[in-house]
Image: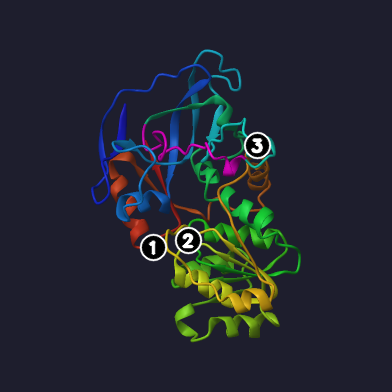
Amino acid sequence: MRAAIFHGPGRPLVVQEVPRPVPGPGDALVKVTACGFCHTDLHYLDHAVSTAKAPPLVLGHEISGVVEELGPGSSARSVGDRVLVRSVLPCGNCEYCLSGNGNICPRLQMPGNHIDGGFAEYIRIPARDLVPLPTDLDLARSAVIADALTTPYHAVVHRARVQTGDWVVVVGCGGVGINAVQFARAAGGNVIAVDLRAEKREAARRLGACETLDPTEYPDLGREVRNRSGGGADVALEVVGTPETVSLALSTLRRGGRLCVVGYSDSVVPIPLNRLMFFEYTIVGSLGCRPADYPRVIEIVRKGKVSLDAVVTATLPLDRIGEAAEDLRNGKGFRTLVVP
């Protein structure tokens, strides 16, 4: 089969022939329909973030496809099923999994990180980690549900706990942040979208943000948010992953507000402890999505409460995967689908 192989940071992905995987006991072989190109993939390529499995490795963790073959004992799915591959694969047996929090399982695996991912014609995956997709959803576009939608759903609903009437600031309106805007609006929040790029601010407004702000236009963005929201944000979602944007998000909170950090960074962020204590801020992290919530997000999409069309801004064949990486580097669009 053909796959785009990651050979290490600072090196381009190379499309080449590799052996087609064989499903073992409990596994499914999925013929990949599409795989979204995520900023996490760019971290491995450009920022020397280490993958759990040493290269060579197939990246890609936003995957949809069709079950092609089943290994022995793989009764969870059937050949021909239209499926979504979960972006994190919990062990299913530890205390976190048994309490419903498999997204923070200490033994979780991630396609395109611990095991070969979806920038290939086929992927081998445990059948239990496949989620059926209804026939009225576009199979290719549904690939982005696996991370770009489920991750902000978990952040908005379970970690930030957005309620009707909350003022919600979303800092960073890229492929995940734009969907944080959608889910926060669907939860009844008044959304203020913050991004450097005019086209992303405009998209956020189309998807329900009541205010959009360019942070470069305001010396004190926190003050501007407080002025527009009547005292500050109840919730701030940071979806970039830099010390500067974490501090920016924190500055927008009202007393008793909640900061939810969704963006990834290995940097140390200074926190003003006097404000944290005196204003009773809450700071939480958010990783991926709980297994039980994947069908819920799929149903939200099926009912049209959030849009896939606004998220998928390009589709490219596997041979042009380098263009997908370049688009992301340049902040172009939200999600590019790679179609093997």
Magenta part mainly helix, strand or loop?
A: loop
161 over 29 or under it: above or below? below
- Counting residues from the start of the chain, the first of labels 2 and 3 encountered is 3
Q: Position of residue 179 (x, y in %)?
A: 57, 57
| Element type where label 2 sits in the image | loop
Start and end of the magenta stretch? 102-120
Q: Farthest residue in the right direction?
A: 164
Q: Nearer the viewer, residue 150 or 159?
A: 159
| Amino acid carrying mark 2 in the image | Gly
CA separation in Å, label 3 and label 1: 39 Å
Residue to which mark 3 is pinned: 95
| Amino acid carrying mark 3 in the image | Glu
| Element type where label 1 sits in the image | loop
Mark 1 packing: few (<14 Cα in 10 Å), some, or many (20+)?
Answer: some
Q: Image check: 171 left or right of 190?
A: left
51 over 83 or under it: above or below? below
Q: Residue 35's quadrant in the figure?
A: top left
Residue to which mark 2 is pinned: 174
Q: Residue 16's quadrant in the figure?
A: top left
CA separation in Å, label 2 and label 1: 8 Å
CA separation in Å, label 2 and label 3: 34 Å
**Residue 331's disc number:** 1
